[in-house]
Amino acid sequence: MPTDQPRPGGEREAASGLRSRAALRAANDTRQAPIDARGKIAVITGANAGIGYQAARQLAAAGATVVLACRHPGRMAEAARAIRKECPNAAIDEVSIDLGSLRSIRAAASAIIDSHPHVDILINNAGVIGEPGWRTLDGFESCFGVNHLGHFALTGLLLDKLIAAADARIVTVSSTAHRVARLNPQEWPSPQNPNIYHAYAASKLANLLFAYHLHSLIAATGAPMRSIACQPGWAATRLLSPRPRSPKHRASVAALQAVGAIIAQPAEDGAQPLLRAATADVPSGVYLGPSRWWRTRGPAAIEESSANSHDAQAGRLLWDLSVELCGVDYSPLAGSTAAGLTLDLPGDRGASEQRKVPKQPDVRTEPLVLPDGEVLTVRPFTAADVGAVEQLHRNCSSRSRHQRYMGGSSPTPEKLRRLLDPSQGLTLLVSEDRSDHGQQIIAVANLIALGADAEVGLLVRDDWQRRGIGTGLLRRLLDYAQKSGRRAVVMHIQSQNTPMLRTVARVGRRSEVKRDGSVASLRIPLTAASNSGKGNKPQGRAASA
């Protein structure tokens, strides 16, 4: 269902069609209590029309300094004039931004950073439903690129300004359309399905995965902000293109517009969930939407989003993919929290169920003897190895990198450094001694602590795969995780490949496999009982070792 808009119309949109819906609006006359936003600085994307414009208008009337962040400068200026006409003392700033261009997003964020000491409210509202095959200037499918990735980049670039506020709100506008989206991480950057409404629904699911994962990071670091998602119901906006190119698209738009003419609420009402998320005392991590008419209209209230939107594994995959695609680092939320980490240990259920993470065991350089008699060296990563590990990634095929990172490309330099030197965990390197080229890194294995569990990832150069290196590395990481008090090791892999499942089977530990579409999650318990059995083979397929 429509939620927001890339096209203009200002206040005229809110008034259009109201006469034909007078009876329905009379049944939905409840309004949010007056808001007080004095001293707040609010950035709103897509603020020249529809629910974005209505949110900007009401925040300006409540005393906020409102930054209109819009693609079309002329329409943005028209919206600013309309707000100033209604509220002569309104503080309005205008910043041009094309969410389909990472260069434009960086320029807009720089302008906001230079002009404002902090950002109290960021409403990620703008959105598109384009045509099949439309792509952003950076080459991403338009719905994913604009609706999710553009806002992901903008939020990350403004993160320091948000943290500088006393109680910042990051409001992500999704849609009830997310409920019909397929959860398929393989298709996020470039979905294969040409149905533009499926692509739109997928982007709105991505909005929620982003908002919830951001909330988990905020909770883990104690950052002074809230991540709140919302949906405006069926609002009368210009999100649907009035002149689609394809006949099939025109027919779909006509059908949706006919239904909307009957049940859609005005944009002013559709903005209420955004305003409540931005100003009301609601907790971080919730999802707000209209409470009547099957969540299409009525007063804003907390609702439950789909089960897919709460998939923590998918949220992490999307987050990592987004960092790689847009190159924006959320380092202010990635600071070390090792001192505050706790472990929930099996069998320890006293008054205090959690313990501090134990001291990490020592790891030394040692030989790795392969089944064919070849002797390699396994050693812990050092800061001097960054260049060699980057070269390893260049030496690996795109298939191997895709299997390792679930996104096809190598990680950004910033992400790679975080993987190699985690605050809690371990990175092991395997090197080959060559008289003509010295030592060459041929494999890297990462173990990153996630509370009581630890996550593992392996990358082996193509010409060394299927020789037992992955098995040797995994055994060492499991031993390290057990000695450091972890409860289990988890791996997220592609379900259509078998070598990693065979690798897990060869280490002789019981494992559990959960499949979700193209992704399989393996969990290897690290209790004493897990080592006493024969080591059950996991059922399914996984990534290459």
Image (cartoon, grey):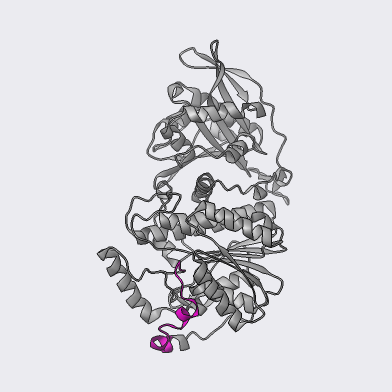
Q: How many marks?
A: 0
| Residue at horizontal 52 percent and vertical 52 percent from the top | 102
Quadrant in the rendering for residue 164: bottom right
Range of magenta residues? 4-24
Question: Where residue 343 sits in the image (x, y, percent)?
Answer: 67, 44
Residue 157 relative to residue 543: left or right: right
**In the figure, 192 relative to 85: above or below?**
above
Of residues 370 and 381, the one drawn nearer to the viewer in this rendering: 381
Question: Where residue 24 sits in the image (x, y, percent)?
Answer: 43, 86
Question: Where residue 196 sits in the image (x, y, percent)?
Answer: 35, 59
| Residue at horizontal 42 percent and vertical 69 percent from the top | 239
Of residues 329 and 404, the one drawn nearer to the viewer in this rendering: 329
**In the figure, 425 relative to 343: above or below?**
above
Q: Is residue 474 visible?
A: no
Q: Residue 111 lies in magenta, yes or no?
A: no
Question: Where residue 423 sits in the image (x, y, percent)?
Answer: 67, 39
Instruction: Pick out the residue farthest to the front.
Output: 74
Of residues 462 and 75, the one drawn nearer to the viewer in this rendering: 75
Q: Residue 20 lies in magenta, yes or no?
A: yes
